[in-house]
Image: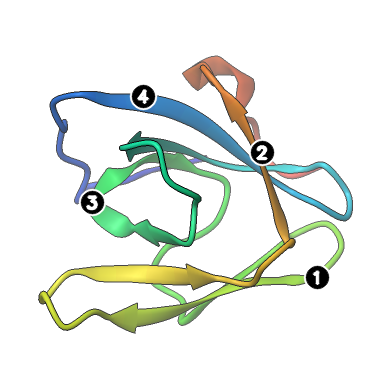
């Protein structure tokens, strides 16, 4: 389990437990702001992750499916643009639910 050193608390955010859509393996605990769809993951809002966030792609450690690619957005933030339909999100994820890959 990786603690994110870049994580910053964001006012008005809610926790989401992000998991792989193919094998249901938990990937990360993310703090989402706003009501919209989850299109990208900003690295400074990822609380905990089962993956090393220094790689250029989010790849599920269990099934090997590509979940997203790393980009630097025009605003200067680093993040991952997600592949549509590759992740599931669950409201109110707790930190203890994320464990090492199976």
Task: Name which of mark 2 and mark 4 comes first in the sequence.
Answer: 4
| CA–CA distance in space, label 3 to label 2 | 21 Å
Q: Earlier in the sequence, mark 2 or mark 1?
A: 1
Query: For residue 77, which quarter of the picture?
Result: bottom left
Apparent side of residue 86 relative to residue 51 in the rendered image (left or right): right
CB under 8 Å between callouts 3 and 4?
A: no
Residue 54 rendering spot, x and y as whole percentages: 38, 71
Is tag 3's residue or tag 2's residue first in the polypeptide sequence? 3
The residues tagged by marks 3 and 4 sit, at their Cα atoms, a distance apart of 14 Å
Between label 2 and label 1, give the one nearer the viewer. 1
SS category of the residue bearing label 1: loop
Q: Within 10 Å of the Cα at label 4, are there few (<14), some (14-19), or many (20+) other Cα atoms?
A: some
Q: Which residue is mark 3?
A: 44
Asked which secondary structure carries label 3, the reply is helix
Residue with the mark numbered 1: 64
For the residues marked 2 and 4, what is the alpha-carbon distance in whole angstroms?
A: 23 Å
Instruction: Say whether disc 3 or disc 4 marks the residue closer to the N-terminus.
Output: 4
């Amino acid at each position: 389990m990786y603690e994110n050193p870049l994580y910053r608390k964001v006012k008005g955010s809610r926790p989401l437990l992000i998991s792989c859509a193919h094998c249901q393996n938990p990937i990360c605990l993310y703090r989402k702001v706003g009501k919209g769809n989850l299109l990208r993951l900003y690295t400074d809002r990822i609380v905990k992750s089962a993956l090393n966030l220094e790689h250029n792609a989010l790849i599920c450690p269990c099934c090997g499916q590509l979940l997203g690619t790393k980009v630097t957005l025009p605003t200067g933030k680093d993040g991952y643009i997600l592949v549509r339909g590759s992740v599931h999100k669950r409201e109110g994820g707790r930190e203890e639910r994320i464990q090492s890959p199976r």
